[in-house]
Image (tube, grey):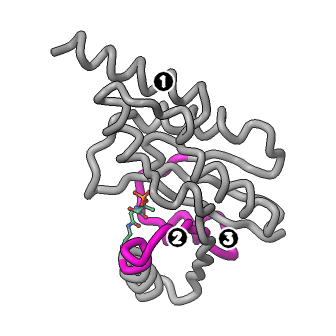
Amino acid sequence: MKTFIFPGSFDPFSLGHIDIAKRASRLCDKLVVAVMINRAKKSMFTVEERVEMAKICLRDVPNIEVISRESLLVDVYRELGASAVVRGLRSESDFRYEAEMNAANTLMFPEYQVIFLPCRADLAFTSSSIIKEVAYYGGDISRMCVPEIEEMVKQKLFHKQQDM
Ligand code: PNS
């Protein structure tokens, strides 16, 4: 049983994330999408909301499970007896960041293995941050995420404005 982990902050889950998750799910028996904390980023959505978003986006793929963990990625790797972690690569800047994370994770757990999948070319320059930025200014995010996520982003921004 080959289990891969696709970890990320997924704030929100984008078309790029869906593409990587679906392609990765074909390379293993089970793909665990792990919603995790990136301490360098301030999240718009709660962990529970991000789990819900990932489940909505991937509900048609039977060998994908969505979990959340507030721990080190290598601890999740050990816990699940994973064979590899999958990360999408968009650009050279992604590579630098990924190489640093990979080095740290390998130092902590030498069996740690990462697989990089190149992002779909037409999605290579979108990101969760861009989705939030475009949505904040009322721009069209319909080609960056599925309609359910678009609605959740709009709702979140609407409620944030109400709170201000
Ligand atoms: O989608 P992101 O924000 O690029 O994902 C980064 C993430 C969540 C995978 C990374 O921050 C992470 O692994 N967080 C858990 C804590 C950890 O293990 N950090 C890596 C040590 S270098």
- Measuring 49% from the left and 67% from the top, which residue is drawn there? 90
- Measuring 43% from the left and 78% from the top, which residue is drawn there? 95
Q: Quadrant of the C terminus?
A: top left
Q: Which percent across, then down, holds residue 24?
A: 72, 63
Q: Quadrant of residue 123?
A: bottom right
Q: Residues within 10 Å of mark 3 (few under 14, many from 20)?
A: few
Q: Quadrant of residue 11?
A: top left
Q: Which mark is residue 152?
A: 1
Residue denoted by label 3: 81
- Measuring 79% from the left and 67% from the top, which residue is drawn there? 28
Q: Earlier in the sequence, mark 2 or mark 3?
A: 3
Question: On the picture, is 95 further left or further right than 40?
Answer: right
Above or below for 56 versus 119:
above
- Measuring 21% from the left and 13% from the top, which residue is drawn there? 163
Question: On the picture, is 112 further left or further right than 31?
Answer: left
- Of 51 and 61, nearer the camera is 61
- Between the C-alphas of marks 3 and 1, the distance is 33 Å
Local secondary structure at mark 2: strand
Give ligand 1's quarter of the image: bottom left
Q: Quadrant of residue 121?
A: bottom right
Q: Which residues are magenta?
A: 68-96
- Of 66 and 160, nearer the camera is 160
The amino acid marked with disc number 2 is Leu
Q: Earlier in the sequence, mark 3 or mark 1?
A: 3
The amino acid marked with disc number 3 is Gly
Question: On the picture, is 29 further left or further right than 39?
Answer: right
The amino acid marked with disc number 1 is Met
Q: Which percent across, then down, holds residue 131?
A: 41, 40
- Of 161 and 109, nearer the camera is 161
Above or below for 53 versus 14:
above
Question: Label 1 near label 3: C-beta < 8 Å?
Answer: no
Local secondary structure at mark 3: loop
